[in-house]
Amino acid sequence: MTELNIAVIYFSATNVTANYAGAIQKEIEKLNARTSLINITPFDSRKQGQKLDTYDGVIFGFPVYSDLAPSVVNEWIDGLDGKGKKCAMFFTYGGRTTGYAHFHTMQLLRNANFKVEFSAEFLGPHTYNVAGWTALTGRPSENDYQIVRDYARLAVECFSAVHESEFRLQKPFGYNTVMDSKRNPPVKTERGWTNPTRVVEECDHCLLCETECPVNAFDSETGLSDFKTCISCMHCVYICPNQAIKANEGMKAGYQFFLTDWNLTEEMMSAKKSRLITESWQAAA
Ligand SMILES: Cc1cc2nc3c(=O)[nH]c(=O)nc-3n(C[C@H](O)[C@H](O)[C@H](O)COP(=O)(O)O)c2cc1C
Ligand code: SF4
Ligand code: SF4
């Protein structure tokens, strides 16, 4: 029998999803399958089409941004052709909720002609910890890694099996209304507290902030992000070697509003568990 060959494709701005993707890759390789790790975070990496013909299965791993995978990821999926290939999804999130991400991404992948087999969600530090939040700083835990091992085993079983499984997710409550409102977002007219700028003079002009921004929104000359296109992923803040780029001052204080707004405590977030999702009822928003 030929060796199973699996692609692990991920988007990751502050390395949470990248770390999970890498851990999944390692566990799959322990099960004697081959893997390729493909990072679709940089703008240019999503310009050329993705050749997937040689893989027996594809794993897609994305962070949750406001209840969905990042908008740029959703647009990228639209341009793929899965040619009936099996795939699995996983999402990382910062302790609030995965919202509609499982259902919505499953629909997009099906429309792109993939056969979605199962999903999972993993907890990790919130992106905005780069600006002083303290959500889930201690994750991944040993329990999270156990789910990584379970996920890898399931992927190998699913992608090597000839039998047809049927993965169905129920449409989450309120999905249509939320999607309608997201289709016509209000036009941004000013810089928000999640649009970073360079605040420290020391800049080596390494251009990383420009070349690695997932949406080409950072201008290393002016030190400003374009607030109309910036998706607030914090990658520029995370990678600047001089820590010269920061989110707005108000961002740190925003953590208290976040907790109050969502009726959350740090204890409640820490108690959440990573999990596999193989049945409809597990993914309810
Ligand atoms: C714009 C934005 C929106 C987010 N929305 C959510 C959310 O709806 N629920 C949640 O729990 N975490 C949310 N997060 C946190 C990220 O999902 C989480 O930290 C993720 O693991 C980051 O992965 P990465 O480092 O691979 O980019 C959001 C982060 C950003 C930047
Ligand atoms: S990543 Fe930092 S050091 Fe490099 S060009 Fe951008 S602001 Fe300057
Ligand atoms: S400019 Fe915005 S979109 Fe680009 S890396 Fe920075 S936070 Fe992310």
Image (spheres, rainbow, N blue to C red):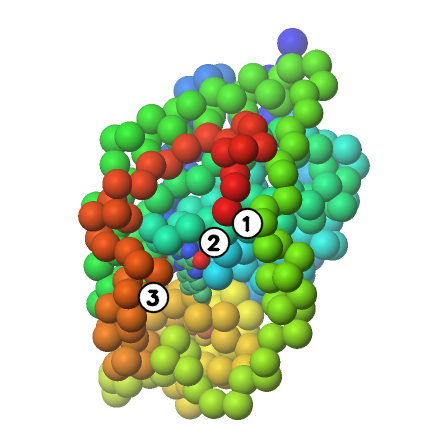
What distance separates the C-alpha of mark 2 from that of mark 1?
7 Å
Label 1 environment density (alpha carbons within 10 Å; few <14, some 14–19, many ≥20)? many
What distance separates the C-alpha of mark 2 from that of mark 3?
18 Å
- Tell me where residue 81 appears, x and y as whole percent: 76, 44
| Nearest-to-viewer mark from 3 and 1 | 3
Determine the residue positioned at 54% across, 28% down. 278
Tell me if label 2 and label 1 are in contact, CB under 8 Å. Answer: yes
| Nearest-to-viewer mark from 2 and 3 | 3
Question: Residue under circle 3?
Answer: 261
Q: Quadrant of the N terminus?
A: top right
What distance separates the C-alpha of mark 3 from that of mark 1?
20 Å
Is 64 placed above or below 275 here?
below
Residue furthest toward the top? 1
Determine the residue positioned at 66% across, 57% down. 176
* Position of residue 196 in the picture relative to residue 33 (left or right): left
* Numbered badge on residue 101: 1
Q: Quadrant of ligand 1?
A: bottom left
Q: Amino acid at mark 2?
A: Val
- Tell me where residue 192 appears, x and y as whole percent: 42, 82
Q: Amino acid at mark 1?
A: Ala
Q: Is mark 2 within 8 Å of ligand 1?
A: yes
Q: Of the residues under marks 3 and 1, which one precedes in the sequence? A: 1
User: Is disc 2 placed on a helix, strand or loop?
Assistant: loop
